[in-house]
Amino acid sequence: MTRTARGDKTRGVRKTSERWVLHVDLDQFIAAVEVLRRPELAGRPILVGGRGDPTERAVVATASYEARAYGVGSGMPLRVAARRVPDAVLLPVDAPAYAAASEEVMGALRGLGPVVEVLGWDEAFLGVETGDPEAFARQAQRAVLDATRLYCSVGVGDNKIRAKIATGFAKPAGVFRLTAANWVAVMAERPTIALWGVGSRVARRLEAHGIRTVGELAAADREVLLAEFGPRMGQWYADLGHGIGSAIVDDTPWVARGHSRETTYQRNLTSPAEVEAAVQELAEQVFGDTVKEGRPVFRLTLKVRYAPFFTQTRSRKLAAPTTDRDTVVTAALALAGTLDPGREVRLLGVRAEMVMPEEGHPTERTPIRGRL
DNA sequence: TCTGGGGTCCTAGGACCC
DNA sequence: TCTGGGGTCCTAGGACCC
């Protein structure tokens, strides 16, 4: 890892380069990709989700800016969003198309020479050494636009947390710098939920301790946070209030620790036989995902959502790691056998975990979770 | 309004051992 | 008869992210 090179700005003779973290985030990525192949949709309110059928159980994956003007957004039930946006264009999710566009974007960024850590289809951290990070950000925007005709926003930071949050202020198609120097001025008055990694539940728990803003979190008693959230998360939130976090950008290829398949059924499953058949199908799909990588499965988890909204999990470590299909399927069915047969099942999921190398882990472990 | 599907990591508590 | 204190392993559930 390269050490930070500090320029001697006081003399102003030559601006030496410093290490910066840039966070690149494509603007309304999925909707933009759809418009690229259907230019006649430009300017229209687009909702992408599920199979594009608003009568089905599905949620919005992306809404175009025109649709967001009606107050809809990602995660909203498709049915509700479609009702709210009068002339909505409804489109099915086309994952392969987005993955292909994503590859072009990442390729364009890599072409500029920084360390590129891919976070998802439409975002990446760049580790760069430069005296002018804003100029580099503009270069990145230009490179992505030239290669893909897609626009992106760039956050400039002195670590990943600040770069990521900065991007929100850069949208659309802009650049914004957030560092230790302006953290308090920009963030102190904002609610804690503005922080990356604080969701509605944690925000509520913080509020119970009188902590509503980022500034209040920064000033909070560390012991209170440790008692409320445990040793690791407590310390994480304490640091987060100050915008403190890792600045390591790591381009090691991502290795999934596990794979899962889940399905929400359009009609609830009512009999044990239906549930069993569904578990078998999901287990076979998951087995296919893991065996492709040639890594053995060592734990299986069954996730069940009963109607209306009650989730249970059943998890079992296998007697020995296995690459055998029947062993995986049998274990999944055994877990299904522990479920309550009298309830209606709305969602089923099967997750397989592969043997995880405890040492030499390819990427840093942080409580910021979930990639792609 | 009623909540997808793919992930990762953390915590609490029970079981078991010395 | 009641029951310490530390450690590890395992499972269930929760929370967050894109």
Image (cartoon, coloured by chain):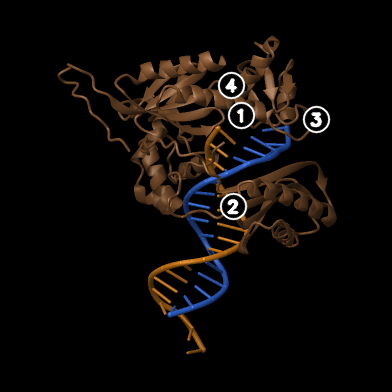
Chain colours: A brown, B blue, C orange
Q: Are marks 2 and 4 on the same chain?
A: yes
Q: Nearer the viewer, residue A313 or A214?
A: A313
Relative placement, left or right, of A244 versus A261 is: left
On the image, the x and y values in percent for residue A310 come to 69, 49
Q: Nearer the viewer, residue A271 or A31?
A: A31
Disc nearest the viewer among 2 and 4: 2
**Mark 1 Cα-neighbour bin, 10 Å: few <14, some 14–19, many ≥20:** some
User: Mark 3, chain letter?
Assistant: A
Q: Are marks 2 and 1 on the same chain?
A: yes
SS at badge 4: loop
- Residue A189 can be seen, yes or no: no
Q: CA distance from mark 3 to mark 2?
A: 39 Å
Q: Which residue is disc 3 drawn over?
A: A55
Name which of mark 2 and mark 1 comes first in the sequence. Answer: 1
Q: Which residue is disc 4 drawn over?
A: A28
Name which of mark 2 and mark 4 comes first in the sequence. Answer: 4
